[in-house]
Amino acid sequence: LYYAVRDGFRYDPYRIDLSPAGMRASTVLAAGFGWCVPKATLLAAACRAIGIPARVGFADVRNHLSTARMREVMQTDVFYWHGYAVLLLDGAWRKATPAFNRELCERFDLLPLEFDGHHDSLYHPFDRQGHRHMEYLADRGAFDDVPLARMTEDFARLYPRWAPRHAEMAGADFPGDVEGERGRSSRTATLNPHQNMRLPSNGMSFMFIMSASRGSFITLALTRSRWARDV
């Protein structure tokens, strides 16, 4: 399920929809893309549909992959309310981040995140070239449902330019803008640890559904579950 959500639905932070409908798992299924929060919601919903307890977790991160367009609109490279799924496996809650699809990672020299059911899956601090990639700044905790009212309030306060330029962002080319960032000389190179940031824990092996893809297993699971509507 993790890989089906990670790679079957393209990451796109330009088309953020903070409405209740925009946060639903079924919306990501229909659109074929999403940003970190609705992709995490989709993974949590699919896990719940097959009996795996799941929540949605949030953190504030500094994202060095941010584009010039996003920096201008957001006036920062800090992404507040970054979302990931938190799954209960063998009695332990484990973090799973399905945001960046493999195609995006390969195109932009990022290390794709893996999830083995034993360890937390968190963003790498560096990309393949040793450039700074992601820094975790604050943990906001995990929730049974997306705290949309709090998110909306914070987005309006922290990103005041976002709402007036929402239509412009939604129509822009995120992959094209990221391509332009690859040549930025201001990115700081350093030694690259080719490993996930992982928090070790004990637990059983997790059987992944590697062959699941959009429109097949996930759709079937969610159509049989109320979480397609409620999460």
Image (tube, rainbow, N blue to C red):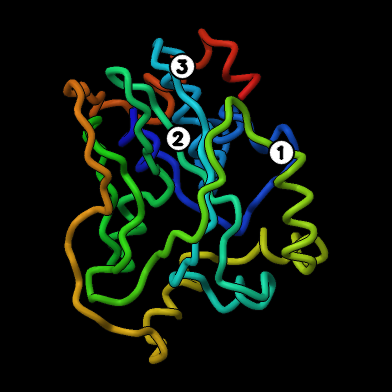
- What is the three-letter code of the residue carrying label 2? Ala
Q: Count how many numbered circles sit on residues in the image.
A: 3
Q: Specify the label residue 222 is tagged with.
A: none
- What is the three-letter code of the residue carrying label 1? Leu
Q: Residue 106, how many percent across, how many down?
A: 27, 61
In the picture, which quadrant includes the C terminus? Answer: top right
Q: In this view, does 55 lie to the left or right of 8?
A: right
Q: Residue tagged by mark 2?
A: 85
- What is the three-letter code of the residue carrying label 3? Arg
Q: Residue 51, how many percent across, how many down?
A: 40, 10
Q: Residue 95, how many percent across, how many down?
A: 38, 37
Label 3: element kind? helix
Q: Residue tagged by mark 3?
A: 48
Residue at image point 56% right, 56% down: 13
Q: Distance between the residues labelled 1 and 3?
A: 20 Å
In the picture, which quadrant includes the N terminus? Answer: top left
Label 2: element kind? strand
